[in-house]
Amino acid sequence: MNKALATRDRLLTEARRLLWSRGYSNVPLREIAQGAGVDVALIARYFGSKLGLFEATLENAFAVPDLPDEDTLIETVLRMFVEAPRDGNTPSVLQLIQTNANDPDVGDIVRRAQAEAMQDKLEALLGSPARAALFMSVLLGFGVGEKTLKLKGIASPGSPAFEAQLRHLMTSALSYKGP
């Protein structure tokens, strides 16, 4: 990898870590540059602006594979939750949403990216905006309960009980038939 690509990748990694975990409005460019070990002027060179850098961190953030049916959806999401990094150094999409979806500068961008990459696909697969919203709400709520609130009743990630709890919630959301 050449030096320019390596620098760009370091900036993206550091920006993702800081902007996703603390929020766009709470992180100065200098801190991102310092964490990446580069001059702050390189952010403008590679991304044009702080907003350009943030938008670059969103590339593939909400990527969802094509899913043929509800059973595959459940199994895919279950694997994603079980295999998600929990080292504290790798920010999650849940953190991105929690810290940025209501930000006055980037909230619309985050919500639009999530809708286009995830919600629209869920609606098409599930046949209903309501079912897709309930399913997404289960995932967000479970993620908050496990990672943010650290609720005692949620089983240890990777355990059969953890998988059973998440499977139950997803199946319940998908059982909604609506009016």
Image: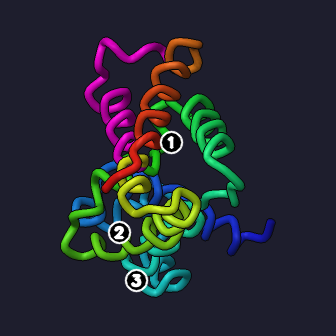
Q: Quadrant of residue 24?
A: bottom left
- Give above or below for 131 relative to 44: above
Residue type pointed to by label 1: Thr
Q: Name the secondary structure under disc 1.
A: loop
x and y, in percent, of residue 67 in the image: 68, 55
Residue type pointed to by label 3: Ser
Magenta span contains residue 144: yes
Q: Residues within 10 Å of mark 1 (few under 14, many from 20)?
A: some
- Give above or below for 91 relative to 62: above
x and y, in percent, of residue 117 in the image: 53, 68
At 53% from the left and 56% from the top, the residue drawn is 126
Magenta span contains residue 104: no
At 65% from the left and 36% from the top, the residue drawn is 75
Q: Residue 49 shows which numbered tag?
A: 3
- For disc 2, the marked residue is 111
Q: Residue 90 shows which numbered tag?
A: 1
**Which of the two labelled residues, at mark 1 and mark 2, occupies the earlier sequence position?**
1
- Give above or below for 84 relative to 113: above
Observer-nearest of 43 and 164: 164
Does residue 122 appear to the left or right of 154 in the view shown?
A: right
